[in-house]
Amino acid sequence: MRETSRSRVVRRYTTEAVRVTAILRLPLIGLMALLGPVISVTHWQSDVFAGLLSGYALIALGWLIFVLVRDVGPWAGWVSTAADVSAVLALCVVSGGATSVLLPVFFLLPISVAFQYRPKLTAIVGVCTAVGYQVVWIVYSKRDDLVGFPDEVYLYFGFLLWLAAATTALSYVLMRRSATVISLMDVRRQLVAESMGAEERERRQLAEHLHDGPLQNVLAARLDVEEARERHPDALLDAAESALRETAAQLRSTVTTLHPQVLAQLGLTAALRELADLFCRRGEMEMSVSLDDVGHPDCQELLYRVARELLTNVTKHARATKVELALSRAGGRITLTVADDGAGFDPAVVPERVAQGHIGLASHTVRVESLGGTFDVTSSPGSGTRVVVTVPDAG
């Protein structure tokens, strides 16, 4: 079953939260390593503490690398949180009187979990953290007569419970807001899809109207002029026949632009190959074409129009000598790449161009993103432009 737009957004938010906590975990471990040299405590099992902390650091570093190179699911929040709680409790058990020194770490645990948009997990971690702090002190008081059970422990236990409630409320608010954003994105995707469908229907109807009406009339008039020219050769008839022939060619080109038949009949790959041939004939540039056969995906009309818009921009503005057009399918996604060695531009000026009424690139970007895709533009003045468009393969 293919991943929905909503699940992709949830996965992206989860991955982002896990990555942030994975990055913040390493500095926290570094601060914990300073406890021994900086603060003098009794009953300090330094060797065991150092061993546990080193192992924790190695696991944290490996986890950071893992989450940076790939996306993760909701399970990652549970795994990383369980590891954090276990590691902190183990460090407290071997740190003797340093439990009070490690108290800030107890406060930070529920805070880090709150940003995972999971109130239940945040509440569980918060309560377990408070209980764990209390249990560690009980272990100390039973293990060593010199370690008492001061009243401050109950006070800190109360603070930790309050923190659990506060972070749970924060996580709930974040979850509600993220759900609202996801809902708005779903509505936006639906509206854009309906708009694209309506536009495609209008294009098809207009193409059919031009083909069955004005184009046929022009072709019929051209035949009449040719017959008349054969019976009575005349320069005016020659000029009229030439004008009609050019008008017919222009109408055919317009019909093809509005609704390319090759796209509907043979699919996206064949349509892009024909489009590349057309632009090669129009412009003086060398085009490298690498097109995988992707059949008839649902997004073929959008990708075709994106490719045509990008190639048109290259022809009009880039002054390029080499152009690359590539299409591939891998990992449940279709990727379209258009690159040139032309003049390039500063992507930061795109909003300004939109304000001036040049909305072609921006409108295609919105449509691609509404389908759960990406529209990446890499360019700089004098260094050419590379555009990589990816969309989910729903075909």
Image (cartoon, rainbow, N blue to C red):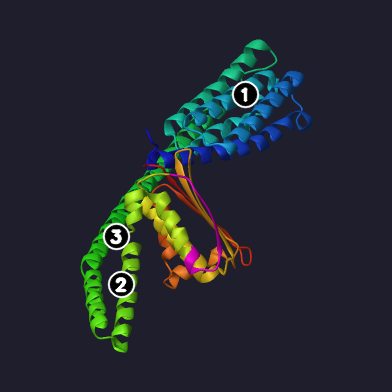
Please give the label number shown on residue 248.
2
Q: Is residue 354 above or below residue 152?
A: below
Question: According to the image, label 3 marks what residue?
Answer: 199
Disc 1 marks which residue? 87
What x and y, as percent, mark residue 59?
Answer: 65, 27
The residue under the point 67% across, 17% down is 147
Q: Nearer the viewer, mark 2 or mark 3?
A: 2
- The span shown in magenta is 280-293
The amino acid pointed to by label 2 is Ala
Mark drawn on residue 289: none
Q: Residue at x 55, y 63 (%)?
A: 347
Q: CA distance from mark 2 to mark 3?
A: 25 Å
Q: Could you say whether the residue bearing mark 3 is in a helix, strand or loop?
A: helix
User: Can residue 365 be spotted in the picture?
Assistant: no
Q: Residue at x 69, y 31 (%)?
A: 32
- Looking at the image, tell me whether mark 1 or mark 2 is earlier in sequence order: 1
Which image quarter holds the N terminus? top left
* Residue 40 figure quarter: top right
Is residue 166 part of the magenta span, yes or no?
Answer: no
Quarter-wise, where is residue 38 in the image? top right
Which one is closest to the eye, mark 1 or mark 3? 3
Name the residue type under label 1: Ala
